[in-house]
Amino acid sequence: MARWRSGTRERLQATALQLFAERGYDETTVAEIAAAAEVTERTFFRHFADKREVLFAGQDDFSGMFTGPVADAPDGTPAFSLVRRSLDAASAFFPRDRRDWSRGRQRVIDAVPALGERELGKLATLKVHLGNALRAHGIDEPAATIAAETAVTVFHLSFAQWIADGEDRDFTAIVHERLDALTRVVHPGS
């Protein structure tokens, strides 16, 4: 087996996702993933703590996509503008060529309740980090928590639409559609 090649992490993720889809998540072992990706198990564990992390790696980077734009915003930026800024920046993480992988990943997560719980935990952690970033930017309570919850809800609904069968719009367009719907709820006639 090859000891190292560029793109090993991505190859492990693609291979794992394929095996999870073919055999089931619980039925697929780390040894099988490593063998199919033509690496050793040791190499697998250099990239991921366990097979679950193949689907959930990068939590800090994920949160940073949302919180970084808030921290970088000019002082005095209103809460809803910070939400929009955060979601626009996060949209860049979901280019069209990532959609098929995201759809496959979600099918695996939906099939295993423990993975679904982990996904919800990831979103809950994002709410906490985003709320902290909003408060650090000067947004008072309860507005900071409401804005963080709103941003994550809009993100979650947008992601679900983006991976829906037959959907071909880019992520940003879907996010803006949901933000516009939210604006109409809060300010009818806008």
Image (cartoon, helix red, strand yellow):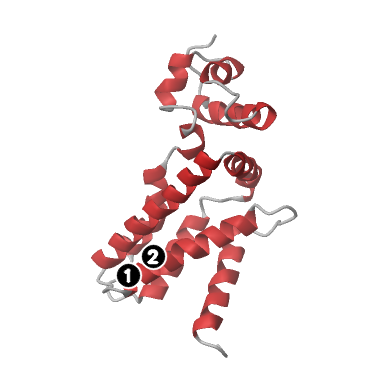
Which amino acid type is marked by label 2? Answer: Ala
How many circles with numbers are drawn on the protein?
2
Left/right of residue 137 with respect to residue 85 in the rendered view: left
Residue drawn at x 37%, y 52% as measured from the top left: 125
Residue drawn at x 53%, y 58% as measured from the top left: 156
In contact (CB < 8 Å): disc 1 and disc 2? yes
Considering every residue shown, the one lying at the far front of the view is 113
Tag 2 residue: 148
- Label placed on residue 4: none
x, y percent for residue 122: 43, 48
Callout 2: helix, strand or loop?
A: helix
- Label placed on residue 144: 1
Front residue of 126/190: it is 126
Which amino acid type is marked by label 1? Answer: Ala
Considering every residue shown, the one lying at the far right of the view is 166
Front residue of 90/42: it is 42
Considering every residue shown, the one lying at the far bottom of the view is 189
